[in-house]
Amino acid sequence: DTLDQMCGQMSCSRKTKRWPLCIFYGMINIMIVNSYVIYVHNKTSKGEKPLSRRNFAKELHSELVKPWLERRMQYQFLAHPLRQSIAAILCCEAPVDQRDHPPVQQEARGRKICGFCPSK
């Protein structure tokens, strides 16, 4: 059937041994195909050219992940490299923390390590 063929051509599934994840990935694949069919129908009825399925899936992914990334960026104790990566994805500046660093971890040899600053 056409749905299985479209899901097979481009799938978000990952190899897993957990059956709930297999079902979840299958639902996501079906959701992407169904939303693309609706998107193409709406665009063609307006006389506009739709995006390719791959570009549509990328745009859909960005729109679904963006609110979560914005919320994650607000976490106070987020590692600096992770904060920089999120800022790069969101195409914005990473907020600079003006607060004092939290207490540092003590290593066995007595060397202090900050958990939020990059190691090098």
Image: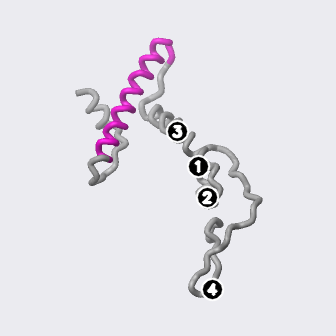
Residue identified by numbered label 1: 72
Q: Residue furthest front?
A: 103
Q: What separation in Å lies between label 1 and label 2 (alpha carbons)? A: 8 Å
Dots 2, 4 in contact, CB < 8 A: no
Tell me which amino acid carries mark 1.
Arg
Q: Please tell me which of labels 2 and 3 falls first in the chain.
A: 3
Q: Secondary structure at mark 2?
A: loop
Q: Give coordinates of residue 11: x percent, y percent.
A: 34, 40
The vertical placement of 40 against 54, above or below, is above
Residue identified by numbered label 2: 78
Q: Quadrant of the N terminus?
A: top left
Residue identified by numbered label 4: 110
Local crowd size for mark 4, using a 10 Å CA cut-off: few (<14), some (14–19), many (≥20): few
Q: What separation in Å lies between label 3 and label 1 (alpha carbons)? A: 15 Å
Q: Please tell me which of labels 1 and 2 falls first in the chain.
A: 1
State the scheme by which the image is colored: one colour
Identified at 67% across, 71% down, the residue is 103
Residue 37's quadrant in the figure? Answer: top left
Tell me which amino acid carries mark 4.
Gly
Q: Secondary structure at mark 1?
A: helix
- Asked whether 42 falls inside the magenta stretch, the response is yes
Local crowd size for mark 2, using a 10 Å CA cut-off: few (<14), some (14–19), many (≥20): some
> Residue 62: which numbered mark, if any?
3
Q: Please tell me which of labels 1 and 4 falls first in the chain.
A: 1
Boundaries of the magenta span? 21-48
Task: Please indicate whether residue 37 sits to the left or right of residue 59 in the image.
Answer: left
Tell me which amino acid carries mark 2.
Leu
Dots 2, 3 in contact, CB < 8 A: no
